[in-house]
């Protein structure tokens, strides 16, 4: 009989639930979701009918979201992506990152897992890490391509795992610990690489998550554009599951 606790999570910018599905597969339980898109909400309602749901992150927080162990969220990438105009975190869409930070500050989860495009590494990562540090969270990060879990496309995405800098989890890095330098602008690298992920890539362990469906870049006539948008914005569940398993392993060590 499994005696490990069931850890809970809340999902910001939930989309159609790829992040959520991956964390549930890893063994965690979803308590709430925040998503503004109408089509995505219909998908969430179908697959998570009993989960509390809010529409706008700007009106979400301690007053309508219950405390959870983990907060996850793939915040908007439109202003960060190289396909956009490069407004970065000052953009209207990607700037919603700061609303996510507000929610984290109010709810104080044990772990925060954020996701965005690989361009974040050069279009705002330092600011993301600095903002997390300002509310007391240390962070680690790495890019994981969908191809590493069997997808026939790259889809490289940055994952950031953050936790309170007073938490014991700090002593056993999940990825590659990053330390904020007190009194010094910016961040410095202690162990940049995801030791666990690189080892998994070399050993083929990510092959356990194979089976990602092929995605055709063409748009056939009659294809539901809302569905295409939902899939395009979705976090690959197999990658989320892998990250979720690493987080869960560390939480269960506490």
Image: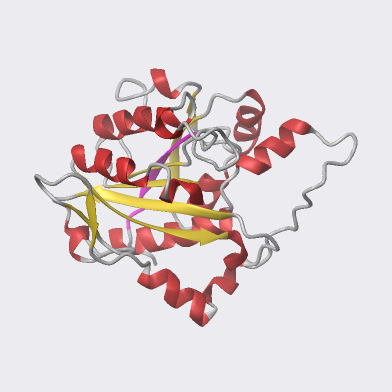
Tell me what residue is drawn at x 56 percent, y 43 percent: 82
Task: Establish if 142 lies above or below 132.
Answer: below
Extreme residue toward the top, this view? 59
Task: Pick the residue in front: 28 or 60.
Answer: 60
* Residue 180 falls within the magenta-colored stretch: no
Q: Quadrant of the N terminus?
A: bottom left
Task: Establish if 205 lies above or below 108.
Answer: below
Q: Is residue 2 left or right of residue 167?
A: right
> Where does the image place residue 243, in percent across and percent down from the top left?
44, 59
Asked whether residue 25 is in view, the answer is no
Q: In the picture, residue 5 is in which quadrant? A: bottom left
> Where does the image place residue 97, in percent across and percent down from the top left?
39, 33
Tell me what residue is drawn at x 51 percent, y 45 percent: 20
Q: In the picture, residue 39 is in which quadrant? A: top right
> Where does the image place residue 199, in percent across and percent down from the top left?
43, 77
Q: From which residue to which does the magenta span run?
A: 5-13
């Amino acid at each position: 009989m499994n005696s490990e606790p069931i850890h809970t999570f809340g999902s910001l910018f939930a989309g159609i639930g790829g992040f959520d599905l991956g964390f549930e597969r890893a063994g965690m339980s979803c308590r709430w979701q925040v998503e503004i898109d109408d089509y995505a909400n219909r998908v969430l309602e179908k697959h998570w009918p009993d989960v509390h749901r809010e529409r706008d992150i700007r009106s979400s927080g301690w007053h309508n979201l219950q405390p959870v162990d983990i907060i996850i969220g793939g915040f908007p990438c439109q202003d960060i992506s190289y396909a956009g105009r490069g407004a970065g975190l000052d953009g209207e869409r990607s700037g919603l990152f700061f609303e996510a930070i507000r929610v984290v500050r109010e709810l104080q989860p044990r772990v925060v897992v954020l996701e965005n495009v690989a361009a974040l590494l050069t279009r705002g990562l330092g600011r993301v890490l600095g903002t997390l540090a300002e509310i007391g969270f240390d962070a680690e990060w790495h890019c994981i391509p969908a191809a590493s879990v069997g997808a026939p496309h790259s889809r490289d995405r940055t994952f950031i795992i953050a936790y309170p800098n007073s938490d014991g989890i700090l002593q056993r890095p999940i990825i590659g610990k990053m330390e904020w330098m007190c009194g010094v602008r910016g961040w410095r690298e202690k162990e940049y690489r995801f030791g666990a992920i690189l080892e998994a890539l070399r050993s083929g362990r990510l092959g356990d998550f194979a089976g990602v469906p092929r995605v055709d870049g063409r748009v056939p006539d009659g294809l539901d554009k809302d569905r295409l948008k939902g899939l395009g914005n979705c976090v690959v569940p197999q990658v989320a599951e892998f990250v979720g398993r690493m987080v869960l392993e560390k939480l269960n060590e506490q």
